[in-house]
Amino acid sequence: MSVVRRPPVVADLTLVTAGAMTANVAGYLLQLLAGRWLGVGGYSEFASLLAVQLLCAVPALALQNVVARERVRGADTAALRGLQWRCAAMVAAVAVVLVPVVTVALDVGVLACAGALAAAPALVLLSGEQGILQGNRRFRELAIVLGAAGIARVTPALALLAMGAGAAPALWATALGLSGAALFARTLASRDAADARHAVEGQSRDNGRHAVEGQSRENGRHAVEGQSRENAPHTVEGQSHENARQAVEGRSHIEGEHGAPVPSESAPTTRPGEVTQHETGGARADGTRRSTTRHTAAVADAAAEPTRADHRTGVLPVLRAAQLQAALMALSSADLIVVRMVLEDEDASRYALGAIATKIAFWLPAAVGVVLYPRMAQPAHSARAIRDALAVLSGIGVLAVAGAALAAPLAPLFAGRDYAPIQGLLWLFALHGAVLAVLQGAVLSAIAVDRTATAALAWLGLAVEVALMIAFARTVPTLIVTAVSVATVTTVIVAGTVLRAAEKPHLTT
């Protein structure tokens, strides 16, 4: 039986979704107000560098997943924080090198570019702490950090933009806000670990005290029962011999002196703290000790902070997870890049608008993977957790597709009659996002079971998608059907591979 009561999975999903939604709304608000305050001329630079910040999230998300996995498997928090700092240092070094490259490639200011890339190491540190909370299954605290990070990133930037500052100060403000969010997450995770240790210490003391009291009562009862059983026959025997002797000798007057039972030399004596060995009593006492030991161990395993450092908590697992995350991100956005190559401007704009439904269906169930990820990382439960996650994601995807089909007639009312040609295709865009959400769940599963070689399948799917789109897609329907088809095949293959890998340990037992 679990000692620590946790909120239901639905409550965890609700909390994490609320935190993520808060961050997303804050991000959309930043883009909306920045577009208004910077104007057409200044917003382009700001928007491009925000996209660069999004790419910086790839190594950060990879680190979060690796940290959560290793934490579930018992890695020490101090070792994981050391990994965070090593990864942050590496990302900072790469960011410094990329500043002049990105500045020239995007034709933006050096200070603005540096501000955008300065967020990269802060994101890594923030995601590392989120991974610790996720691995500890502290989803309430994780939700708080997610929402607080989104607000901390946006608020100082909006304040500067409202005062008339340009893109560079605003981007530096986002980096500063993320640094503050990382510090807040570190404080929250450390306090959570301290509370867990105190709870376990108190539980252990209570268990030990109750075990000793119970053992003492059990020992005393068995000792008394054993002594009584041993003394009873000797008492009867002594009394019989005494009476016979007195009858023969005619000395019945001494009956009162020898009436008390005399302990036999063979009668067992019980010393303080010693358990008298009887078949029934000994087994019960031993069973009590075993039960108490198992209970105490269960408490410690469930809530105590592990002290074992996992030998795999190095940078290499993070790099493997990062290239898997990068493959997913590329596969989810490749169509928006290719569309400008193969379609006319008007059709490309219509496709881009339809892709909003894709993004909604993709990000809507993101909390499912976050909440179920710790179970995926446990070898004994990974296969079941992966199946549960993929099933839940598929169910939410069906609802998203149905919702898009029902809401399709409203699209021209919001976007204008020019977008009416894609009205009947919105369900396909939503289906694309739903399939990508399942693929994201499969990717998280691959990282959880440390089977990141499946990234090759995602990269292969990306190559096939781009090749087919460039070769054959010349209309919006053809393009979205190609995207959905390739994403579906890739998802089925990746998910099947990960499930087989998760089930292998159980096949050998």
Image (tube, rainbow, N blue to C red):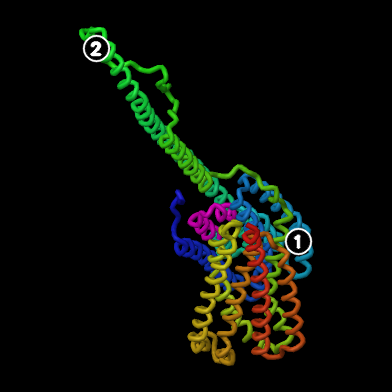
Q: Secondary structure at mark 1?
A: helix
Residue placed most toward the observer, 404 or 376: 376
Residue placed most toward the observer, 23 or 3: 3
Residue 50 picture location, percent across and down:
65, 67
Instruction: Determine the CA span between mark 1 and mark 2.
Output: 116 Å
**Which numbered disc, 1 or 2, marks the residue closer to the eye?**
2
Q: Which residues are magenta?
A: 129-149
> Type of residue at label 1?
Val
Magenta segment's dominant SS is helix
Q: Earlier in the sequence, mark 1 or mark 2?
A: 1
Residue 413 picture location, percent across and down:
50, 88
Check disc 1 and report the residue beneath it.
Answer: 99
Residue 341 picture location, percent across and down:
74, 84
Check disc 2 and report the residue beneath it.
Answer: 247
Q: Which residue sits at x=75%, y=79%?
A: 464
Label 1 neighbour load within 10 Å: few <14, some 14-19, many 20+: many
Residue 489 picture location, percent across and down:
67, 78
Q: Which residue sits at x=59%, y=56%?
A: 378
Residue 145 covered by magenta stretch: yes
Q: Mark 2 and mark 1 in contact (Cβ < 8 Å)?
A: no
Residue 64: quarter of image? bottom right
Query: Is residue 422 found left or right of 340 in the rendered image?
Result: left
Residue 45 marker? none
Query: Is residue 392 found left or right of 117 in the rendered image?
Result: left
- State whether residue 459 is above or below residue 128: below
Query: Is residue 203 found left or right of 76 in the rendered image?
Result: left
Query: Is residue 184 something that shows in the picture?
Result: yes
